[in-house]
Image (cartoon, helix red, strand yellow):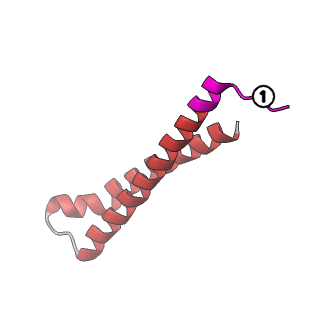
Amino acid sequence: MLLFAAGMICGIFVRYCIREAYCSALPAIAAGRATTADNAEFALLIRKATWALVVLWILLLAIGALGALKPAFD
């Protein structure tokens, strides 16, 4: 149950980072008036989302492995 909850938190965090990147930095980047700070903010948010996605995949693999192996926790 804890792995599932952590997976949901990671998924929500990925969505939050991507939404923040698109709302804050990307309009300036697309308009061609981006500053170094806009580019850095976009890169930071995407980097955070990427790491959360990696953790999400690790959690999903762990959930799958535990489901397949079915260890006995007595």
Whether the magenta-drawn stretch holds residue 5 is answered as no
Which one is in front, 54 or 74?
74
From the image, which quarter does the C terminus lie in? top right
User: How far across and down, in percent of the image, does residue 15 sit?
Assistant: 44, 46
Residue 63 lies in quadrant: top right
Q: Which is nearer the eye, 1 or 39?
A: 1
Tell me the quarter of the picture where residue 65 sits: top right
The residue lying at 61 percent from left, 24 percent from top is: 68
- Position of residue 17 relative to residue 9, above or below, is below
Q: Which residue does the image show at 70% across and 36% down from the upper left?
A: 1
Query: As rendered, which of 62 and 56 lies closer to the eye?
Result: 62
Instruction: Give the farthest residue toward the left.
Output: 32
Looking at the image, residue 1 lies above or below residue 52? above
Extreme residue in the bottom direction: 36
Disc 1: CA contacts within 10 A as few (<14), some (14-19) or many (>=20): few
- Residue 73 at what x, y percent from top left? 80, 32
Which residue is denoted by mark 1 in the rendering?
Answer: 72
Tell me, yes or no, whether the highlighted magenta stretch contains residue 68: yes
Pinpoint residue 71: horizontal percent, then vertical percent: 72, 29
Residue 70's quadrant in the figure? top right
Label count reads 1
Residue 35 in the figure: left or right of residue 51:
left
Q: Residue at x 38, y 59 (%)?
A: 47
The three-letter amino acid code for the residue at tag 1 is Ala
Task: Look at the numbered disc 1 and give the secondary structure of its residue.
Answer: loop
Residue range corresponding to the magenta coloring:
64-74
Instruction: Determine whether, in the image, residue 2 is placed left or right of residue 13.
Output: right
